[in-house]
Amino acid sequence: MNAFDELANNFSRLPGIGKKSAIRMVNWLLKQDSSYVQKFAQNLGHLQERIKPCSVCGTWTESDPCPICSNPLRDSSQICVVEQPQDVSTIEAYGEYKGKYHVLGGLLRPLEGIGPAQLSIQPLLNRIKDGSVTEIIIATNPTVEGDTTALYLNKVIMELQLPDSPKVTRLATGIPVGGDLEYIDKRTLALSFRGRSEF
């Protein structure tokens, strides 16, 4: 296997990148200035050295704790629980949420051997125990695994039996803005009815 094929094979292992896209990427890189390609390779080579999980919330960061955890203007009484570090970036892009985060590192999938011990659940419980957290917002995906994980988290948080137990909420799910009822699937419609709110 030559260098071209090796690099194309490496790119094709990235999520969402097929063999044809990988070949296009390698061809594109070959046409670029060598200083750009060297800088690209250098950045890629140092990626895992420079970017680590935050010791508090688990999101990717160069400084520990991360800028969100160390920001005194963020609301420490709210913790938004997400599945993966990229979910933090997604929520931050909206600019509405001003609390802090906790990354689980996955979802409960017993058939795949992923139980509570494989996720960052105990560190979350430790963050709650001091009594300063008033709300846990569970922002896992509305899938079977996401729902199972959310129910489990609610259960273990309630089992802490804290004097001021935090409120556990789940992100609302349902009909998207601009959506048409005719094209909404049954599960989404059912969730919309269950999560309806007053005007």
Image (cartoon, grey):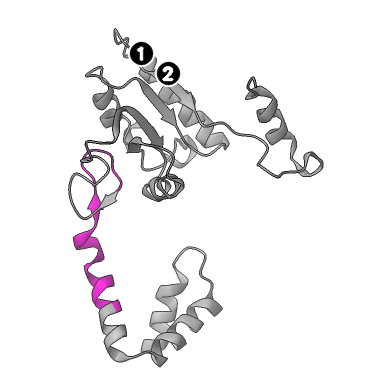
State yes or no: discs 1 and 2 in contact (Cβ < 8 Å): yes
Q: Which residues are magenta?
A: 40-59
Q: Quadrant of the C terminus?
A: top right
Residue extending farthest top? 163
Q: CA distance from mark 1 to mark 2?
A: 6 Å
Q: Position of residue 17 (x, y in %)?
A: 51, 69
Question: Quadrant location of residue 77?
Answer: top left
User: In the rendered view, does 171 fall on the left or right side of 55?
Assistant: right
Q: What amino acid is found at the position of numbered circle 1 in the picture?
A: Glu
- How dense is the environment of label 2, judged by Cα within 10 Å: few (below 14), some, or many (20 and up)? few
Viewer-proximal residue among 97 and 127: 97
Q: Give the residue displayed 19% in from the left and 44% down from the top.
A: 65
Q: What amino acid is found at the position of numbered circle 2 in the picture?
A: Lys
- How dense is the environment of label 1, judged by Cα within 10 Å: few (below 14), some, or many (20 and up)? few
Label placed on residue 159? 1
Label placed on residue 54? none
Kindly identify which residue carries mark 2.
155
Placement of 153 over or under 91, stated as above or below: above
Residue extending farthest right? 182
